[in-house]
Image (spheres, rainbow, N blue to C red):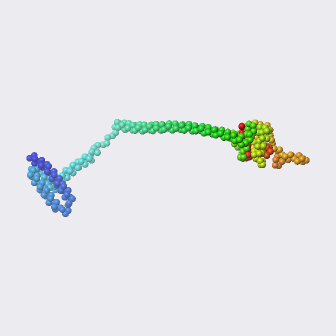
Amino acid sequence: MQAAWLLGALVVPQLLGISHGARGADREWEGGWGGAQEEEREREALMLKHLQEALGLPAGRGDENPEGTPEGKGTWGTEEDGQGEEEEEETTTNPTTGPSPSPTPEDTVTYILGRLAGLDAGLHQLHVRLHALDTRMVELTRGLRQLREAAGDTRDAVQALQEAQSRAEREHGRLEGCLKGLRLGHKCFLLSRDFEAQAAAQARCAARGGSLAQPADRQQMEALTRYLRATLAPYNWPVWLGVHDRRAEGLYLFENGQRVSFFAWHRAPSPEPGAGPSNAPHPLSPNQPNGGTLENCVAQASDDGSWWDHDCERRLYYVCEYPF
């Protein structure tokens, strides 16, 4: 008897599955195959009935769904629908079982502590970034200090090179003046054929280790006259000397500040013998100096060595003197 029940428990679900599969196939093939399927369902229902009788199963269990008819389907569907409705009711009623709980003081404190923890974390990140920026700033400051020190060293080196170049240029000018010019005692004179104003000529002579010519006595003046005449002959070119009265009118000084002790001013030619004296100035070669405050620098003529006062901004040849 137990074997019969076991066999029924194994076979009936399979037959029910077959009936359900047939029912699904019935839905798919309704139409032209309706008659054949109806016969197949009747045959299956009859077989199921005989099997229930052989196994001694209650007839009511098989009558509930004897051949997978719509009634049986309705019964199972009703149960399934009932279960589905219960699940839907549970699903529907579960979210709305009661009103949402109001926050407690503990929840508020927890929320505030969480926000404070977030702010603390943000502040910590800001401190980390500020520390990184501070470190970078220190490195940049150190690098800038090193660059300034290097620039200072470079500036000193450049200044030293410029000073060395100036010394070399002065030494070169001195040697050139004594080798190419006129050597006279403890000084040398060298003519320059560049046109310059008196101040610019003095600057160029000083850059080469000398100054504008400053004949200390008449002997040096006569030697300088012979040198200029021999160099510029047969032309007569005025040449700047280191003599001026810029400080005070009529007070003639050398470029080194010493007062001039002798003069060789140009004088107008004397009248012919037998002619009466004339107070009118010579139109081409008047007596010098005659410029007043407008002409404060002295130039020497290259033909006779006479001195002429000129405007200091006039561009003339110049002669430098160098110590020997």
Residue 118, horizontal then vertical, whole percent: 40, 38
Q: Is residue 64 above or below residue 142?
A: below
**Residue drawn at 65 percent across, 39 percent down:** 168
Res 221 → quadrant: top right
Residue 184, horizontal then vertical, whole percent: 75, 39
Q: Most extreme residue toward the right, as rendered?
A: 274
Residue 303, horizontal then vertical, whole percent: 79, 46
Left or right: 239, with 55 as reference point = right
Left or right: 324, with 265 as reference point = left
**Residue drawn at 70 percent across, 43 percent down:** 200
Q: Is residue 236 above or below residue 252?
A: below
Residue 247, horizontal then vertical, whole percent: 75, 39
Residue 39 appears in the figure:
yes
Residue nearer the viewer, 23 or 161: 161
Instruction: State the count of labels.
Output: 0
Left or right: 270, with 105 as reference point = right
Please identify the quadrant where the C terminus is shown. top right
**Residue drawn at 13 percent across, 52 percent down:** 62
**Residue drawn at 10 percent across, 48 percent down:** 4
Residue nearer the viewer, 26 or 128: 128
Residue 208 appears in the figure:
no
Q: Most extreme residue toward the front, as rendered?
A: 179
